[in-house]
Image: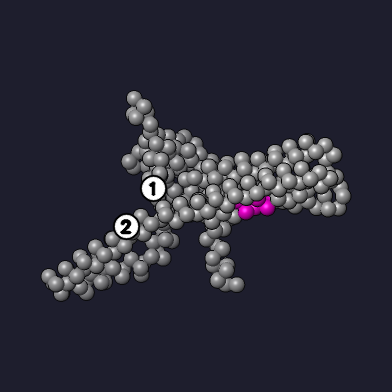
Amino acid sequence: MTGQSAAVRPLVEQIQARPRLQRGWEVSLAAGFTGFVLLAGRVFGSLPADSDIIRGLGTLWLVQGGCLMAWLAVKSLTRHESNSSLHRLCWAGLLFAGTVQTSLALLPLQSFAGILGGLFGLLLLAGFLTHDALESVTCGALDQLPTLSKDNAEAVSADKTTEAGALEANSTVVDLESAAVEPEINEDAVNDDLTQWLKRKRLEDGGEEVEGMLRLEMASGQTQRSAHVTFSPALAMTPEIECEPLCDVDVEASIGDAYPHGFRVDVRRGRANAEAVTIEIGFQAIATADTSSNAA
């Protein structure tokens, strides 16, 4: 049980920190729950089958098409999200399970043509979702290979540099080892004092993504606080920014002014007599590629 909890915890933390992953889970879970409710209604007789075969078959295909559109929407919403392959695989499974249950609830059993048409649509949908979801997982794994290779190359280069330094002056080995150990000893102290961090990377389409966290302190009785985050160098254009509190304190966080070189985040809480607290705000900024120069 402990091993399973340790494996699930990173996924839960990703969902809590990334609103777009939350939207994907909300859509897929809603589809699965709706299908379950409709199928239960059909089993217990509260949802009779449509007597019009053409209309019933059209309804089935409309539901299956809606599942396809929902999948494409959540996939497009998280196309820039790193480590989201497993989430997409779960979404595809939940969407298809909900569509199967809904199709069974609406299936016109009195018509062989209606049954055949509904099952044919489900087979096509299953084939597409399986292929597309597995392709997303494969692409996500391949995207991590360059990073791993780069890390290995840096490790090899560091080993060679250490060996060369040892051959030139053996007396410096002890000093280098001591310097390498110091950050590990002081790691907890550094994390406790951390007030802001940023992670910036280049996207496949040429844009850039910035993820990070900032820590704010609100004094006793203080109801609002603002802070600024700076991008250096500036992004190619004004990014799309989302932010969310990462703590258990009841506060609201919103984005104020946003520019290519940074943005302002505003934090508010309702109680004027509240005690002093420390608040952590997570944020994500995505700037698409600047195509104006190419168009010119």
* Residue 19 painted magenta: no
Tell me where the magenta segment starts and ends, as one range.
91-98
Badge 1 density bin: few <14, some 14–19, many ≥20, Cα 10 Å: some
Residue 230 locus on image (x, y percent): 38, 42
* Residue 95 painted magenta: yes
Q: Tell me the SS state at disc 1.
A: strand
Residue 17 in view here: no
Residue at 32% over, 41% down: 233
Q: In the displayed image of the protein, which residue is found farthest to the front? A: 112
Question: Pointers 2 and 1 in contact (CB under 8 A)?
Answer: no
* Disc 1 residue type (three-letter): Arg
> Front-most of 41 and 16?
41
Residue 67 locus on image (x, y percent): 65, 44
Q: Horizontal placement of 272 versus 164: left or right?
A: right
* Disc 2 residue type (three-letter): Lys
Q: CA distance from mark 2 to mark 1?
A: 17 Å
Residue 261 locus on image (x, y percent): 38, 37
| Of the image marks 2 and 1, the number of the one nearer the N terminus | 2
Q: Quadrant of residue 262?
A: top left
> Front-most of 230 and 92?
92
Camera-near label (2 vs 1) is 2
> Front-most of 137 and 51?
51
For label 1, the residue is 200
For label 2, the residue is 150
